Image (cartoon, grey):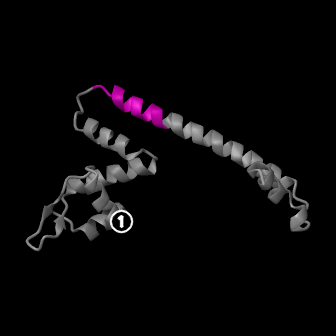
Amino acid sequence: MNYGIGEASRATGIKVPTIRYYEGVGLLSPPTRSEGKQRRYQPADIARLNFIRHARDLGFEIGDIRELLTLSTRPDQSCDQVDVITRRHLSDVERRIAQLSALRVELLRMVNECTHGRIYECRVIESIQEAGGA
């Protein structure tokens, strides 16, 4: 069985322009073409697109996905490099969580100081202006 690009999009949940993008950046090999020059994807292409989509859902960058895809073609090798990529990504995620937690604390502080009065009394506006140097 083979799929047109629209069918591949529906099967994977990846938008058509994004599939073309993945082809362009080399995550997906150029597909075969029909006599009418339409892209035709095989089940292996759909599986690869699903892998890419899930990796993107997990927040992996394109370069890391490219490397993971390459590593996945060598199943008998050590998974040390996969661990390095994943640990690096986990570290980035933990850093972002810490930043978001700090942001949450600051926003809660600003909201809790709100007196629900007039804009000229608004602690949220005042806090933003103070932090921005205005």
- Asked which quadrant contains residue 24, the reply is bottom left
- Residue 78 at x, y percent in the picture: 29, 25
Q: What type of secondary structure mainly makes up the magenta span?
A: helix
Q: Write down the residue under mark 1.
A: 15
Residue 29 in picture, x, y percent from top left = 20, 52
Q: Start and end of the magenta stretch? A: 78-89
Farthest residue to the front: give it.
134
Residue 132's place in the image compared with 15, above or below, is above
* Residue 122 located left or right of residue 37: right
- Mark 1 Cα-neighbour bin, 10 Å: few <14, some 14–19, many ≥20: some
What is the residue that sits farthest to the left in this orientation? 35
Relative to 74, does residue 58 appear above or below in the rendering? below
Instruction: Choose between 13 and 67: the one closer to the eye.
Output: 67
Name the quadrant of the N terminus.
bottom left
Q: Residue at x 33, y 28 (%)?
A: 79
Identify which residue, 29 or 13, lies in the foreground: 29
Q: Quadrant of residue 96?
A: top right
Rendered location of residue 64, percent (x, y): 37, 40
Q: Is residue 116 visible?
A: no
